[in-house]
Image (cartoon, rainbow, N blue to C red):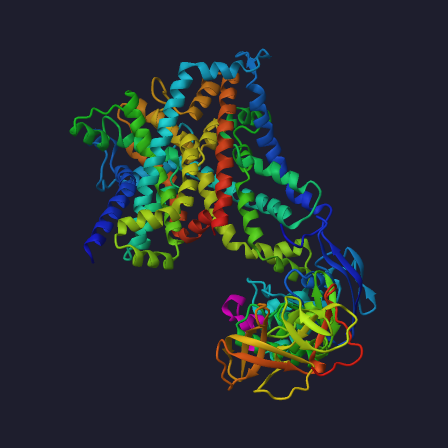
């Protein structure tokens, strides 16, 4: 911290108090409660709970439904992260290389960041609507009878497209700022050493962008796991049926719709462990990024 | 105005690392003291303890006639100039100068008078409304000085205030600081790692090494009579030539083999011989020598810097390197052999065990 | 212009269209009337019913909701966005100030407590959070909506990073100038943090405004609905309708994105700086 610090006996506690109270009541308590509930079987009618050890976990992990959801989540996360990173990288590289209109492109490509996932979801649902949506009309023209909300894969497709659309801007912002922080002298040195622009990109620029890329990869995984909730909820129109859902959505479904408190909590705890690992990896990335600078 | 005295001041950090290991120093009222030493020698820590920015582990700091160990920095009646100036970036120059005065509850009219007076002295009156980022490095330095002056403190503390300036500006500001300090007569404690800055500014130098005082004295005294090999090699540029010597029969030899013609009576069987580059003179031909020391050296490189040249040479096969300062116009051939000699009063001897200076006993004889 | 540059521009233009067209379609559709949309699908051209559609969604209750108008939802969204951003900035600045500038027992312990919140997003502890807020009687209230969202320490983390980057010498100079902890905070640190505060405010306002899952659970009373929360309601009514008011649905979507989009576009450089810097 600072070389010189204040040594006032009471003040630091008073400064921390509001944050600590909120953290204790709305973070530590519920987190502990989630862990506790994951070991209990709650009576759906509210008549007490029985300790069941790891039963909730084994039940959750062994159910075919959970396996299906986990597989979908994995695929959804991979595809969403890949396309939103790839599209953003392509656009960032182009936006970095053009001189004319660079700032206009930047604005045009980043503003969608501000749109809430469910708003994106609503617009997406309408664009993909079987009756009035131009996208499904286009698909029909190509011979694809798109049925969002009915066909498993069509629904997944819509979820991915909307999620990618919503995520490209933030990746774009980070890639562009990463590209702009590559020293001009390095680019000039590369231009002298290597004639081919494509080769220069893959051998010089891309490795220099790697820290940003790793960092964004984690951000994108977290996004696909959690922040897409609003998109998925809208695409499903509240009727999951046989449609694909992500793990987080399943926690919500089992907990609030299915009233399976223990099972939902066990799934929460599994997700907690997953997020914990991701966050630790992310912090290590950040540390390394600091070292690079 | 007041003197400052340090009485066996120590600083030990929580991890047990000892930064200052017992420093005592009496600074007279109006004196300009420079703390000089390599990085990590504890000079900044010492200054910051006087300022009140570091706690004092042990010992006493007195400003005027008050022991200030437990007194807040703001109440110590000192002002400090920081290396990076530490100007408040969101305040105008005027407010940067006035902020400390406002906090002390000084009246508006008095603040205004003092700020304008300081601005006039430092020639920054035209910039009073500007923010620090709109100023050049030199101007910021002046503002930092101004912030110290307006306080009218008992003492100025300078923490490497010139090291962020370019070479030319540094020389200029050095002279201005000296003039200003003399005209205000304020006791000053100044930290630097630059020996030239230390020499030119100080009334007295305090050379620090490893948290301890190596030597205290006027710049010339420290230069002429370094108390240790550390001071000898730190003060002066190029540094003093140091070579280990051993008694060999009647005379002395370099520890690494080569004989040298030196006659002197020392009690030790070995010692470190110190020779300033400018105290070595080159002997032409076979001229008779009345000096107690003579060396044959092989020229390895020559650095002409205009008025003078620094001749780098080795002593025979030993690899012992020395630097000789020669007049600028003289030409030297790399690989040629030179004879150099030094006068008796220019020889420095240090203990090979402690590195401390050894006083000569008896007389040196011509070789 | 060289040929490869034309190619670059082409890609950028396609990218920009990919981002913009869906929203343009949403907006243009909202200016048509429900029947023609039902007949002809979504629209890319001006429909001329802008005023009546937007007046209806802003001022008339009914349609998608029973008792609230778009204006009320807009107001609720603003309260959520502003309350969240301001609350978060105030609370996290104070906490970060304590963590960076004070030496006190248990300091490191509290630091880890607060930062543990970065490990688990609200989504994974949603059910117990909901039950606790319900138990505290905070359902259908602004405090129940806003305060639990503040529990995550992102703001504290950003401010801690920023405070650490403020040169040490400033607090030293301030102490020599006689400023205590309160004075230093108000006179020096807060003014110094202005840009950072602005950047975090924008990020947090957008984040708060865009909240969905939490408001969906906490607000069952329509008078507390935000626009984003309302999206689901809109959809549920929309899919059940004979001739759905697609124009009004799109109009509400446009309203729900307008304020955050405007803020992000207008304060773009601050926002980007805040986003990129704070992640370091």
Q: Quadrant of residue B31?
A: bottom right
State which quarter of the image contains the C terminus of chain B.
bottom right
Q: Where residue A9 sits in the image (x, y, percent)?
A: 73, 47
Q: Residue most toward the right?
A: B65
Q: Main secondary structure of the magenta part?
A: helix
Relative depth, front residue between B223 and C63: B223
Above/below status of A268 relative to C51: above
- Whether residue B134 appears in magenta in the rendering, the answer is yes
Q: Residue most toward the bottom?
A: B287
Evaluate whether residue B41 shows in this view: yes
Q: Where residue B329 sits in the image (x, y, percent)?
A: 51, 86
Above/below status of B229 relative to A276: below
Q: How many marks?
A: 0
**Left or right: residue C26 compared with residue B164:** left
Q: Residue at x 67, y 49 (%)?
A: C102
Question: Start and end of the magenta stretch?
Answer: B125-141
Q: Residue at x 53, y 74 (%)?
A: B167
Q: Where residue C229 sits in the image (x, y, percent)?
A: 42, 32
Evaluate whether residue B107 shows in this view: no
């Amino acid at each position: 911290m600072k070389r010189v610090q204040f040594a006032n006996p009471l003040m630091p506690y008073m400064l921390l108090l509001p944050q600590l109270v909120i953290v204790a009541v709305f973070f530590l308590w519920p987190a502990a409660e989630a862990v506790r509930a994951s070991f209990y079987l709650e009576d759906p009618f509210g008549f007490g709970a029985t300790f069941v050890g790891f039963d909730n976990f084994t039940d959750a992990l062994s159910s075919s439904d959970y396996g299906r959801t986990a597989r979908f989540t994995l695929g959804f996360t991979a595809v969403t992260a890949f396309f939103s990173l790839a599209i953003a990288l392509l656009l960032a590289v182009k936006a970095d290389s053009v001189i004319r209109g660079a700032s206009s492109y930047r604005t045009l490509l980043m503003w969608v960041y501000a749109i809430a996932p469910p708003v994106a979801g609503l617009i997406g649902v309408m664009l993909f609507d079987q009756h009035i949506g131009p996208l499904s009309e286009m698909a029909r023209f190509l011979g694809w009878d798109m049925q969002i909300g009915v066909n498993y894969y069509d629904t997944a497709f819509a979820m991915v497209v909307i999620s990618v659309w919503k995520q490209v801007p933030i990746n774009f912002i980070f890639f562009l700022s990463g590209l702009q922080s590559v020293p001009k002298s390095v680019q000039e040195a590369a231009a002298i050493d290597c004639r081919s622009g494509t080769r220069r990109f893959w051998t010089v620029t891309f490795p220099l962008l790697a820290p940003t890329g790793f960092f964004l990869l984690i951000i994108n995984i977290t996004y696909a796991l959690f922040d897409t909730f609003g998109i998925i909820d809208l695409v499903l129109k509240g009727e999951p049926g046989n449609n694909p859902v992500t793990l987080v959505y399943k926690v919500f479904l089992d907990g609030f719709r299915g009233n399976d408190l223990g099972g939902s909590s066990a799934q929460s705890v599994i997700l907690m462990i997953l997020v914990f690992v991701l966050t630790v990896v992310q912090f290590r990335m950040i540390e390394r990024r600091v070292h690079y600078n | 105005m007041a003197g400052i005295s340090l009485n066996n001041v120590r600083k030990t950090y929580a991890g047990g690392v000892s930064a200052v290991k017992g420093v005592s120093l009496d600074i007279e009222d109006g004196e300009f003291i420079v703390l000089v030493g390599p990085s990590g020698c504890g000079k900044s820590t010492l200054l910051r303890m006087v300022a009140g920015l570091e706690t004092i582990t042990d010992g006493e700091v007195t400003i005027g006639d008050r022991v200030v160990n437990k007194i807040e920095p703001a109440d110590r009646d000192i002002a400090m100039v920081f290396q990076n100036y530490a100007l408040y970036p969101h305040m105008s120059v005027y407010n940067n100068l006035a902020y400390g005065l406002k906090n002390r509850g000084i009246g508006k009219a008095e603040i205004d008078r003092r700020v304008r007076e300081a601005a006039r002295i430092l020639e920054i009156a035209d910039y009073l409304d500007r923010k620090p980022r709109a100023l050049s490095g030199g101007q910021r330095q002046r503002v930092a000085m101004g912030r110290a002056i307006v306080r009218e403190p008992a003492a100025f503390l300078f923490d490497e205030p010139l090291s962020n300036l370019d070479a030319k500006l540094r020389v200029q500001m050095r002279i201005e600081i000296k003039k200003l300090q003399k005209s205000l007569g304020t006791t000053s404690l100044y930290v630097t790692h630059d020996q030239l800055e230390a020499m030119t500014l100080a009334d007295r130098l305090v050379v620090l090494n490893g948290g301890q005082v190596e030597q205290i004295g006027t710049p010339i005294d420290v230069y002429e009579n370094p108390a240790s090999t550390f001071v000898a090699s730190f003060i002066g540029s190029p540094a003093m030539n140091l070579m280990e010597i051993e008694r060999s029969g009647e005379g002395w030899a370099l520890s690494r083999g080569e004989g040298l013609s030196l006659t002197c009576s020392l009690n030790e069987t070995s010692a470190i011989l110190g020779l300033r580059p400018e105290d070595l003179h080159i002997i032409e031909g076979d001229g008779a020598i009345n000096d107690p020391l003579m060396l044959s050296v092989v020229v390895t490189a020559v650095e002409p810097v205009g008025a003078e040249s620094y001749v780098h040479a080795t002593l025979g096969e030993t690899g012992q390197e020395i630097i000789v300062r020669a007049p600028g116009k003289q030409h030297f051939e790399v690989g040629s052999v030179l004879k150099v000699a030094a006068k008796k009063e220019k020889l420095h001897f240090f203990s090979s065990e402690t590195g401390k200076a050894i006083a000569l006993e008896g007389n040196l004889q011509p070789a | 212009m060289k040929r490869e540059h034309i190619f670059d521009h082409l890609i950028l233009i396609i990218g920009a269209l990919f981002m913009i067209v869906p929203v343009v379609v949403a907006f243009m559709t909202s200016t048509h009337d429900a029947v023609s949309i039902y007949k002809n699908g979504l629209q890319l051209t001006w429909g001329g019913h802008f005023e009546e559609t937007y007046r209806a969604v802003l001022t008339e209750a009914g349609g998608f909701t029973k008792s609230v108008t778009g204006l009320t939802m807009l107001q609720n969204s603003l309260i959520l966005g502003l309350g969240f951003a301001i609350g978060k900035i105030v609370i996290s600045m104070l906490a970060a100030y304590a963590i960076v500038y004070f030496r006190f027992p248990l300091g490191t312990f509290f630091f880890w407590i607060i930062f543990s919140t970065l490990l688990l997003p609200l989504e994974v502890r949603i059910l117990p959070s909901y039950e606790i807020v319900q138990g505290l009687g905070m359902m259908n209230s602004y405090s129940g909506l806003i305060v639990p969202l503040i529990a995550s320490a992102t703001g504290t983390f950003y401010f801690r990073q920023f405070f650490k980057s403020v040169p040490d010498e400033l607090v030293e100079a301030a102490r020599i100038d006689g400023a205590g902890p309160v004075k230093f905070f108000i006179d020096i640190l807060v003014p110094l943090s202005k840009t950072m505060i602005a950047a975090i405010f924008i990020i947090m306002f957008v984040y708060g405004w865009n909240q969905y899952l939490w408001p969906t659970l906490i607000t069952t009373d329509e008078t507390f609905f935000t626009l984003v929360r309302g999206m689901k309601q809109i959809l549920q009514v929309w899919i059940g309708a004979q001739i759905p008011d697609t124009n009004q649905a799109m109009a509400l979507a446009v309203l729900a994105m307008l304020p955050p989009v405007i803020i992000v576009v207008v304060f773009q450089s601050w926002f980007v700086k805040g986003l990129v810097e704070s992640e370091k």
